[in-house]
Image: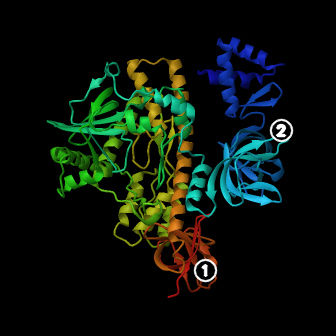
Amino acid sequence: MSTKKKILELLNGNSLVFSNADKLFLFLSSALDMEENQVKKIFYSLLSNGEIFELRKNKFITIPSHGFVKGEFFGTAKGFGFVKVDGFKEDVFIPANKTKGAMDGELVIVKLLSQNQEGADGEVVSIYKELESIVGTVEVAGNNFFLSPDNNKISFDLPIMKTGLKIQKNMKVMAKVVRTDAGKVKCCVSEILGLKDDVKALELSIIRDHNLFENFPSQVVEAEKKVPKTVSDAQKKGRLDLTKEIIFTIDGADAKDLDDAVHIKKLDDGYELGVHIADVGNYVPVGSVIDEEAAKRGTSVYFPTSVLPMLPKSLSNGICSLNEGVERLTLSCIMKVDFSGKVVDYQICESFIKSVARLTYKEVYAAITGESLNEKTQPLQKHFLLMRELCDILEANTKKRGALDLEIPEVQFVFDDAGMAVDITRRERNEAHRLIEDFMVLANETVARHFHKAGIPFVYRVHEAPTKEKLFSVCDFLKGIGVRYPKIPDNITPAYFQEILDGVENLNSKDVVNKIVLRSMQKAKYSNKNLGHFGLSLVDYCHFTSPIRRYPDLTIHRIIKEWLHKKGSICATRKDELDEFAFESAETSSSCERNADYAERDVDDLWKAYLMKDRVGEVFDASISSVTNFGIFVALENTVEGLVKVEDLPDDAYLFLEKQLKLKGSAHVFSIGDHVKVELVNVNLHTRNIDFKIANP
């Protein structure tokens, strides 16, 4: 049992009360046979994570217990809020006078006031994780400045405290939240982002609102300077030397952080496929300042105009990047794959490589198709063709096991030299992308299966099956649009959903059914429990292949390296510690991933709105992407989406048919997937809302 769990067990059993903190820590250090400073560090960590609550002076309880729970606070424009609590079917309602000034997104401890079958009411008693900052627009009232938050779920403006920064009305700013002893909430401007009508300022506002930053803290910059720039002979000792292998990278043309490389050979009885991943853990020790910042960021975030990396550039683009022609430390998964596509043997090891070529998807695709060859791709063309040969086998297996093949279009913006968007298209994917994706999936599965079988704590990439209710909704929709579907099985499998998709492949409803199936799916996340990956139809799966840009990958690299160094011999106590390490990494990484997804989506929506703002009055061909009781959402071919409000539909008395996703009137019917002509009527850059109306015939 880990020390954290032991402390929680002691608290839970005793609800400890001491006359002062010194006596508490003396008791805990004695009970746990640990140094007092170490106990203090763990204890305050539990306190800051809301796992312990000081009920009254020097009386501590665990959470949840004694009618107290913890969760995330969701505010509303009207002042009241809700707290999402793990294990509760319904969110806990918090009246406006019981919020303790909590703001949307903060983590709180709640005292339950009442609870019944319909839900629970409560009051916030502690905010254990406050917003670090807040973004908004400067407003003026008299001689006082106030911050009007961009987040409309924060129901009040914050008084701005005086600093050396010269602020003025209509500026977009980021400010630090300051809570006074009297419980009042103020703010202190820390960064001026620009004027509210500047699209670049609005983009930066979104980025800051998600607590994302381009620059690294000064202590990280200092630590970064000490990271070696080349691989030394001492670092190579004990590693598998793969520098004689023909290993290469394939990435996008603009990629700088090259964290995966491959090699392939034809054997008498199959193939040897090597997937080689940057050994980031060798340069980023656990608990170092670089590691703490990486864990806080959780992932690199990709915007149309920039990338916010998880690691400093000297690592992500330098010593950790598998650049052409230089030696790099790697973790390798070298698999022997038979002609049926089964991994019959494998080796997971520390290694070092020297990439022979840095290739782009476009170059490799041109080489595979015979379109063109250059000095890099010509000598490697036979390797590409061998990759395609194995890829075809793997994809046949993927289809056979019933993995989902959902088409999710990605947007790509075109920018001019001034950094302003001038066009929008769908991102192109070709066969070269497929090669790398399939090989990475195979390596991820192989590594996950190995550590699951070995009983070593790990971080898995999990995707749980959709609920029966979601499946019934999909089938109700198909029935409503006249599409036949297979008999609903007792056990939901991805093959069932794929059968639905295959059934509409040649129908006009293909795109809309694809979208409805996608919406029925649960979101993939990270977990220390191996729950399988529904979409890929795999029992074992993890993210092993991108430690430069994803913290869960870095987490499991450390576990892999410890397993290798200890030759698989890890004691029970250490397994408990690793399981806790995996759990915390999975939880924080999932949260960071969600935040990054929201930020990327919001910035995309901003640039889409920017591109449409001068086209008000134009008519477009569109398809209905969603139907609600207040209107229909329509999507243009270039992926821009907007709302047609009910009042902007042709005059009629409309009834919302939720199961069929239709708005039905006496003379008009609007269903998801229908093609319509719409006129652009309004674009709001600040809210990123785009409004259309049905165009006159």
Image quadrant in which you'd find residue 132: top right
Between disc 2 and disc 1, the foreground one is 2
Q: Which class describes the residues within 10 Å of circle 2: few (<14), some (14-19), or many (20+)?
A: few
- Render colour scheme: rainbow
Q: Residues within 10 Å of mark 1 (few under 14, many from 20)?
A: some
Which residue is the site of mark 2?
Answer: 181
| Image x and y of residue 199, in percent | 56, 62
Q: Secondary structure at mark 1?
A: helix
Does residue 156 appear anywhere in the picture?
Answer: no
The quadrant in which the N terminus is found is top right
Q: Is residue 363 left or right of residue 211?
A: left
The residue lying furthest to the left in this view is 268
| Residue at the image point whose x is 57% and y is 43% from the top | 591
Q: Are marks 2 and 1 in contact (CB under 8 Å)?
A: no
Q: In the drawing, does residue 135 fall left or right of residue 232?
A: right
Q: Is residue 22 left or right of residue 553?
A: right
Q: Residue at x 35, y 43 (%)?
A: 441
Q: Amino acid at mark 1?
A: Asp
Pointer 2 or 1: first along the chain: 2
Residue 200 versus residue 668 in the image, above or below: above
The amino acid type, in three-letter code, at marker 2 is Asp
Work out whether 498 lies above or below 677.
Answer: above
Regarding mark 2 in the picture, which secondary structure is present there? loop
Mark 1 lies on residue: 648
